[in-house]
Image (cartoon, grey):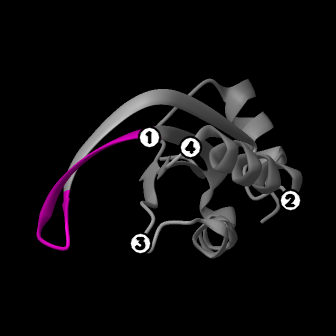
């Protein structure tokens, strides 16, 4: 297991995803944020079946940086209950993992 984490979060539009993603990288809460447009989310919210087009953000951070990233993400996000899922990174290329760790304030 490494110190690296992948955080997933859906956004309602590209502008919000880009704004928040840029903010998180500038503040060094994330080393990198990838924005994946064209995601279709199917879910149940408040008893109603929903289908929405979203932008999926894939954020690279560390265990030490996750708490700050999560707080900032939830504070800035327009959803009532934004998706914030943190997945541990089991392994990866040593150079990339070191770059990721060096890019996150923790």
- Report x, y in % for residue 36: 53, 29
Main secondary structure along the magenta-highlighted residues = strand
Say which quarter of the image contains residue 27. bottom right
Which residue occupies the foreground of this view, 23 or 42?
42
Label 1 element class: strand
Instruction: Work out whether mark 4 precedes mark 3 in sequence or the reverse, and give the earlier one.
Output: 4
- Report x, y in % for residue 93: 62, 23
- Whether residue 24 sits left or right of residue 57 in the image: it is right
| Number of other residues with Cα within 10 Å of mark 4, as a class: few under 14, some 14 to 19, many 20 or more | some
Give the residue at x 75% y 59%: 29
- Per the rendering, the mark at residue 81 is 3
Give the residue at x 71% y 42%: 18
Q: CA distance from mark 1 to mark 2?
A: 24 Å
* Tags 3 and 1 touching, CB below 8 Å: no
Which residue occupies the foreground of this view, 11 or 48?
48
Q: CA distance from mark 2 to mark 3?
A: 23 Å
- Report x, y in % for residue 63: 60, 62
Instruction: Work out whether mark 1 precedes mark 2 in sequence or the reverse, and give the earlier one.
Output: 2
Q: Which residues are magenta?
A: 44-54
Between disc 2 and disc 4, the foreground one is: 4
Decide whether residue 32 is among the magenta residues: no
| Number of other residues with Cα within 10 Å of mark 3, as a class: few under 14, some 14 to 19, many 20 or more | few
Which residue is the site of mark 1?
A: 54
Label 4 element class: loop
Q: CA distance from mark 4 to mark 3?
A: 16 Å
* Tags 2 and 3 touching, CB below 8 Å: no
- Whether residue 20 sits left or right of residue 74 in the image: it is right
Which residue is the site of mark 2?
A: 27
User: Which corner quadrant holds the C terminus?
Assistant: bottom right
Between disc 2 and disc 3, the foreground one is: 3
Which residue is the site of mark 4?
A: 13
């Amino acid at each position: 297991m490494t110190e690296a984490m992948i955080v997933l979060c859906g956004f309602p539009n590209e502008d919000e995803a880009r704004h928040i993603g840029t903010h998180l990288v500038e503040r060094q809460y994330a080393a990198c944020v990838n924005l994946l447009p064209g995601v279709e989310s199917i879910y149940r919210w408040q008893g109603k079946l929903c289908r929405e087009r979203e932008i999926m953000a894939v954020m690279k951070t560390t265990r030490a940086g996750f708490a700050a990233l999560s707080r900032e993400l939830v504070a800035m996000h327009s959803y009532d209950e934004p998706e914030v899922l943190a997945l541990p990174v089991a392994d990866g290329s040593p150079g990339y993992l070191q770059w990721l760790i060096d890019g996150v304030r923790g």
